[in-house]
Amino acid sequence: SVTQLVSVDFLRQNDLPTDGSGLVLMHACSDSMGYTIPHGSLLLVDTKEREFDDFISDKVYVFRADNEMMCKRAIRNLDGTVLLTSDNRGRTTYPDQTVDRDTFSQLDMWGRVRYAFTPF
């Protein structure tokens, strides 16, 4: 169980629901996001931001695919596909993936990473 106290002011300043609805805490479980979100960072995820038509390009989202959780930056391409990329530049370990709408919907998007509490 993870506990992180945040104030209503923090939620308001980050344009998050002040009642905490839809917000979950989880740990980043790999270094796929490089220095942006180091391994072990505590993430504040907004689970209300999870629809294909509403996602914001170039933001980081949490997905589940093949029973594995992953964080990826999602970039909308002009042809309607989505590029899922890692900020870690190790492309052999974390290759970019381009997916269409159908594949994207199979990924089970959990929500958008709104804040990362990074370890020192």
Image (cartoon, rainbow, N blue to C red):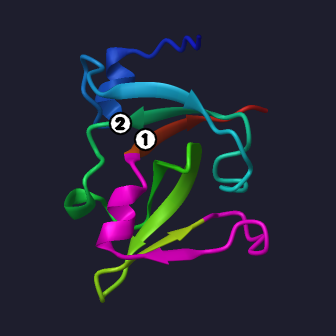
Quarter-of-image position of residue 22: top left
Q: Nearer the viewer, residue 51 or 68?
A: 68
* Label 2 packing within 10 angstroms: few (<14), some (14-19), many (20+): many
> Which mark lies nearer to you, 2 or 1?
2
In contact (CB < 8 Å): disc 2 and disc 1: yes
* Label 1 packing within 10 angstroms: few (<14), some (14-19), many (20+): some
Q: Amino acid at mark 2?
A: Asp
Q: Position of residue 3 (x, y in %)?
A: 55, 11
* First in residue order: circle 2 vs circle 1: 2
In this rendering, would 27 be left or right of 115?
A: right
Total numbered labels:
2
Q: Position of residue 108 (x, y in %)?
A: 39, 49
Residue at point 72%, 46% (across, down): 30
**117 relative to 4, above or below:** below
Using the numbered discs, state the Cα–Cα distance from disc 2 to disc 1 in whole angstroms. Answer: 7 Å
Outermost residue, bottom direction?
A: 79
| Residue that carries the numbered disc 2 in the rendered image | 46
In this rendering, would 94 be left or right of 25?
A: right
Give yes or no for residue 60 being in the magenta stretch: no
